[in-house]
């Protein structure tokens, strides 16, 4: 009895494979999947369930055959009664399947059937096992695809690549000049070689989101990306500051995450942020290792003048966290502060000791006790334990933030590796201990709401 728009809303929330299977339910349902305005066709939906790890080559090929068939079926003119506003295809780069998909999508674009296209290219190879030769070959295949199907590239708005080395190509030309409609670019171990420079100067680009994961650039210089709103970089190899900004007037959200290895040196965050003027959300994740930022406070005021939300994550459990108060002094407009404490028994082994420096608690010699944060409304501690350094930090924030409304204390996020290898009991306060903990936090001071979240 539901109307078509409600049924399509439901079908849009399941996999394309499941949506097609519903077409056998009745005559009315027979054509509903071909009325969906947005389609996601993911090769992983066609893999065996449960799927072996790693996935076998024959399973990947069979899944790609099914994905190609599904794409052909969904884009068939004789069955489709409406245009597709957005098609999201996620595939493996094997054999000639990318060209087959390119031909199908190109025909749909030329026929006015498709408006926007999103492409994600998966790779089962572990980054550590991926050779430069293989990564260079993948770049050439991507380049040939873009050259062979220009109509596809002209409607490409989202691109996600994995294990691609553009060392023999012009990376700017392939990803920015060719893909003029691109809005979201995600690169997982994609670069032009170890410690290379990637310089982006694209005043006409429409990219608003740029994601980098384990890319081996020595440095990324964003000279000009006027519509960039969010940039995230997880794990870099640079020995110093990995990033520099020029003209990024729209940049509002920045995420930096890295476990610093032995030969990586700390840098001034104020210098990295030079050129930014509109950041309102900042995430710094140290992944349980030494800090890669140098002590600063007032020097950050210019870059932090519009900061509303700050997340400082991956602080090793034995570290003092009072140093993070320096950020509160530099950002008087901050409204939400999240601190995450890192405790992972699974990362204490010989392999870690060979790559990472000794963990030393940071000591920032700064006086931030007389400052006030009148706008801070919420403090969140992830990985809370009844440790004195955490109580000391929370009381310090209470003293500085007279308008604080809420303190959220969360249990540490689950780690499969820790759970599998260690029998680690939870150190989060039990129900009958929470009133006592709340009393220790307040210690006679004003009382914001304290929430314990398991």
Image (cartoon, grey):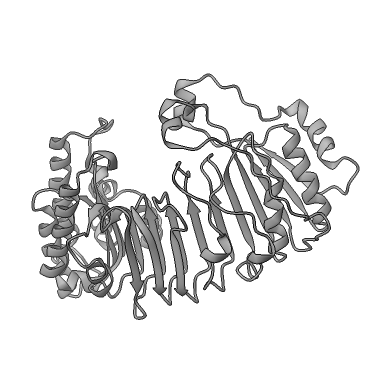
Instruction: Give the camera-side residue of 94 and 5.
Output: 94
Q: Quadrant of the N terminus?
A: bottom left
Q: Is residue 97 above or below residue 274?
A: above
Q: Which residue occupies 22% across, 35% down?
A: 55
Q: Is residue 333 left or right of residue 75?
A: right
Q: Residue furthest top?
A: 423
Can residue 103 be seen here? The reply is yes
Q: Which residue occupies 43% across, 75% down?
A: 227
Q: Is residue 386 left or right of residue 210?
A: right
Instruction: Give the camera-side residue of 52 and 129.
Output: 129
Labels in figure, total = 0
Q: Position of residue 169 (x, y in %)?
A: 18, 64
Q: Which residue occupies 45% across, 25% down?
A: 349
Q: Is residue 316 above or below residue 171?
A: above
Instruction: Give the camera-side residue of 350 and 191.
Output: 350
Q: Which residue occupies 44% across, 28% down?
A: 417
Q: Residue furthest bottom?
A: 204
Q: Quadrant of the C terminus?
A: top right
Can residue 76 be seen here? The reply is no
Q: Position of residue 186 (x, y in %)?
A: 34, 58
Instruction: Give the camera-side residue of 310 and 100.
Output: 310
Q: Is residue 163 left or right of residue 384?
A: left
Q: Position of residue 73 (x, y in %)?
A: 15, 56
Q: Residue furthest right?
A: 444
Q: Position of residue 236 (x, y in %)?
A: 40, 51
Q: Is residue 191 above or below residue 290?
A: below
């Amino acid at each position: 009895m539901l109307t078509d728009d409600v049924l399509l809303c439901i079908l849009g929330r399941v996999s394309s494979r499941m949506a097609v299977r519903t077409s056998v339910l009745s005559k009315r349902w027979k054509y509903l999947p071909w009325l969906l305005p947005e389609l996601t066709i993911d090769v992983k939906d066609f893999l065996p369930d449960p799927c072996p790890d790693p996935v076998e080559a024959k399973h990947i090929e069979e899944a790609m055959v099914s994905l190609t068939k599904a794409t052909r079926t969904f884009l068939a003119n004789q069955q489709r009664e409406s245009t597709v506003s957005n098609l999201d295809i996620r595939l493996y780069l094997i054999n000639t399947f990318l060209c087959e998909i390119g031909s199908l999508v190109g025909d749909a674009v030329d026929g006015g059937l498709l408006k926007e296209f999103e492409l994600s290219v998966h790779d089962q190879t572990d980054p550590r096992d991926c050779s430069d030769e293989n990564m260079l070959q993948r770049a050439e295949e991507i380049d040939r695809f873009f050259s062979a199907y220009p109509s596809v590239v002209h409607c490409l708005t989202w691109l996600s690549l994995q294990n691609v080395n553009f060392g023999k190509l012009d990376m700017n030309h392939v990803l920015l000049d060719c893909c003029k409609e691109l809005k979201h670019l995600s690169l997982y171990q994609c670069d032009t070689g170890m410690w290379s420079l990637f310089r982006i100067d694209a005043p006409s680009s429409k990219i608003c989101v740029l994601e980098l994961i384990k890319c081996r650039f020595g440095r990324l210089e964003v000279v000009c990306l006027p519509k960039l709103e969010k940039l995230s970089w997880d794990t870099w190899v640079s020995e110093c500051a990995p990033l520099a900004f020029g003209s990024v007037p729209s940049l509002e959200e920045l995420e930096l995450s890295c476990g610093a290895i032995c030969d990586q040196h700390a840098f001034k965050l104020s210098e990295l942020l030079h050129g930014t003027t509109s950041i309102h959300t900042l995430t710094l994740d140290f992944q349980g290792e030494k800090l890669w930022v140098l002590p600063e406070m007032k020097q950050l005021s210019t870059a932090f003048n519009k900061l509303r939300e700050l997340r400082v994550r991956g602080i090793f459990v034995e570290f003092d966290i009072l140093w993070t108060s320096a950020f509160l002094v530099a950002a008087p407009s901050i409204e939400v502060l999240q601190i995450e404490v890192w405790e992972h028994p699974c990362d204490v082994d010989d392999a870690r000791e060979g790559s990472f420096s000794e963990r030393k608690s940071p000591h920032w010699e700064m006086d931030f006790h007389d400052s006030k944060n009148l706008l801070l409304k919420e403090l969140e501690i992830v990985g809370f334990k009844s440790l004195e350094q955490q109580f000391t930090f929370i009381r310090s924030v209470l003293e500085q933030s007279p308008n604080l409304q809420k303190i959220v204390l969360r249990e540490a996020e689950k780690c499969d590796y820790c759970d599998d290898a260690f029998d680690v009991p939870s150190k989060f306060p039990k129900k009958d201990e929470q009133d006592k903990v709340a009393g220790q936090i307040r210690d006679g001071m004003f009382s914001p709401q304290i929430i314990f979240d398991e």
